[in-house]
Image (cartoon, rainbow, N blue to C red):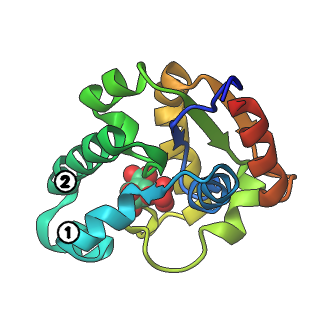
């Protein structure tokens, strides 16, 4: 057709609890692209993420994460990355060449979203929201460095953010 095509690839980055998986799934459905969550791909290959952190350590998780991100980017689709994927310089180099949307959320709104198990980095003595805020502060510049667009999900329904992302893609 003569109509402009939406890009075949979109990457979602941002801190834990920003809505990357939830919004990514919706954007994939709306655009007909496949959806890939790199955390899920890692878990499929190597077992549950808390078990990876406990048995192999974060450094090994980051190695497997870099592999999962490179594979997902090569295959295309709507790809949501784990919150720490941008720590890898190789990953940031890849992200500079593709459309990247940054999703953010306020500490107030994230509290309810990060409740529960499954995110080993938020476990420990420190209050989870304080820990989340500290980790986010450390990574903020990395997210901004790779992002082409930025949406905050704190006060907007996930369905609406997904629509905004789809509009941005067109
Ligand atoms: C992490 C975020 C998690 C997951 C792992 C580490 C991080 O993904 O990759 O627990 O370093 O921020 P989500 O951002 O999908 O929670």
In-image side of 113 versus 13 (left or right): right
Q: Residues within 10 Å of mark 1 (few under 14, many from 20)?
A: few
* First along the sequence among labels 2 and 1: 1
Q: CA distance from mark 2 to mark 1?
A: 9 Å
Judging from the image, what secondary structure is the residue with disc 1 in?
Answer: helix
Q: Residue at x 43, y 68 (%)?
A: 119
In-image side of 163 versus 9 (left or right): right
Residue 121, x across and y down, in percent = 39, 61
Q: Nearer the viewer, residue 161 or 107?
A: 161
Residue 64, numbered label: 2
- Tell me if the residue at label 2 has its CB under 8 Å from ligand 1: no
Whether residue 58 is situated above or below residue 106 in the rendered picture: below
Numbered-mark total: 2
Eye-nearest disc, 2 or 1: 1
Residue 32, x across and y down, in percent = 60, 53
Residue placed farthest to the front in the image? 1
Whether residue 46 is situated above or below residue 134 in the rendered picture: below
**Screen quadrant of the N terminus:** top right
Whether residue 13 is situated above or below residue 154 in the rendered picture: above
In-image side of 27 versus 61 (left or right): right
Residue 36, x across and y down, in percent = 43, 57
* Ligand 1 image-quadrant field: bottom left
**Screen quadrant of the C terminus:** top right
Residue 65, x across and y down, in percent = 26, 50
Tell me whether circle 2 and circle 1 mark residues in contact (CB < 8 Å): yes
Q: Residue at x 54, y 51 (%)?
A: 33
* Location of residue 167 by image quarter: top right
Residue 53, numbered label: none
* Location of residue 43 by image quarter: bottom left
Q: Which residue is mark 1?
A: 45
Judging from the image, what secondary structure is the residue with disc 2 in?
Answer: helix
Q: Residue at x 54, y 55 (%)?
A: 16
């Amino acid at each position: 057709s003569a109509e402009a095509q939406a890009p075949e690839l979109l990457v979602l980055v941002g801190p834990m609890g920003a809505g990357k998986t939830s919004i990514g799934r919706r954007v994939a459905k709306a655009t007909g692209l496949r959806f890939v969550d790199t955390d899920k791909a890692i878990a499929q290959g190597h077992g549950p993420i808390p078990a990876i952190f406990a048995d192999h350590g974060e450094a090994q998780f980051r190695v497997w994460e870099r592999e999962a991100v490179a594979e997902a980017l090569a295959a295309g689709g709507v790809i949501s990355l784990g919150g720490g994927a941008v720590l890898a310089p190789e990953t940031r180099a890849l992200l500079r060449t593709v459309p990247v949307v940054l999703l953010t959320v306020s500490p107030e709104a994230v509290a309810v979203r990060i409740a529960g198990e499954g995110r080993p980095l938020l476990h420990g003595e420190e209050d989870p929201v304080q820990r989340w805020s500290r980790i986010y502060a450390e990574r903020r510049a990395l997210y901004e460095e790779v992002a082409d667009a930025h949406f905050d999900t704190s006060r907007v329904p996930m369905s609406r953010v997904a629509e905004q992302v789809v509009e941005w893609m067109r």
